[in-house]
Image (cartoon, grey):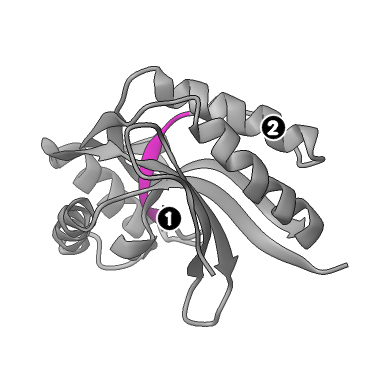
Amino acid sequence: MDTIRAFIAIDLPPEIQASLQQVVLRLKKNIPSGVRWVQANHIHITLKFLGETPLSVIKRIILILPKISSKFHTFPISVGGLGAFPNPKRPRVIWIGINAPHMLMDIQKMVDIETVNLGCPGENRAFSPHLTLGRVQRYASQPELMDISNTLSSNRIGELGSFNAQGITLFQSILKSTGPEYVKQTKARFQNDSPSDMLE
């Protein structure tokens, strides 16, 4: 069965990605090792990670995304605040926070329901919107973990900017030795914007 590794997300404008890149460069000065940093142009708000998905299901997802997006209008999202999961003292994922209206939660819930109806696994944890900057390596040493924790505790990141979310995008994730490559499969736009467009 032909499959692709895929996820559904809200993508970010270049100016927000550029601000996130500056934050990564700032953190790297105090965290020289122990973290796999995410390329700024790969940072997005993940709504649903699909994993390996049959192409037959992908085609159906492409059809339902405009139906979901048509129920929502564009809305503002602000970006700022630094944190870690599960917490800064035991960091596994380093993130920048986002502030958005409850509509974002509604969109994520609808995406989850509709994809589950197509046979995709449901989310088993509560949606916590964020922007992943880096992932702590599994075998990071104790000194590296100390550097990470101290840097997170001593750095304060204010608001980096804001933007209007324009739609939801289906990405294919192609795993390569140099890191993942993300390819847009389709973008379904919210109301008050141009109709959804399909990308070759």
- According to the picture, the residue beneath numbered tag 2 turns out to be 114
- SS for dot 1: strand
Numbered circle sitting on residue 199: none
Asked if residue 4 lies left or right of residue 133, the reply is right
Residue nearer the viewer, 24 or 180: 180
Asked if residue 179 lies left or right of residue 48, the reply is left
Residue nearer the viewer, 173 or 125: 173
Q: In which quarter of the image is residue 135?
A: bottom left
Badge nearest the viewer, 1 or 2: 2
Q: In this view, does 10 lie above or below 111?
A: below
Q: Examine the rendering and report whether any part of residue 102 can be seen.
A: yes
- SS for dot 2: helix
Q: In which quarter of the image is residue 143?
A: bottom left
Q: Identify the residue at image location x=69%, y=32%.
A: 114
Looking at the image, which residue sits at the far right? 1
- Please state which amino acid type lies under the numbered disc 1: Val
Judge whether residue 132 is colored magenta: yes
* The magenta segment: 128-135
| Dot 2 crowding, Cα within 10 Å, few <14, some 14–19, many 20+ | some
| Dot 1 crowding, Cα within 10 Å, few <14, some 14–19, many 20+ | many
Residue nearer the viewer, 102 or 129: 102
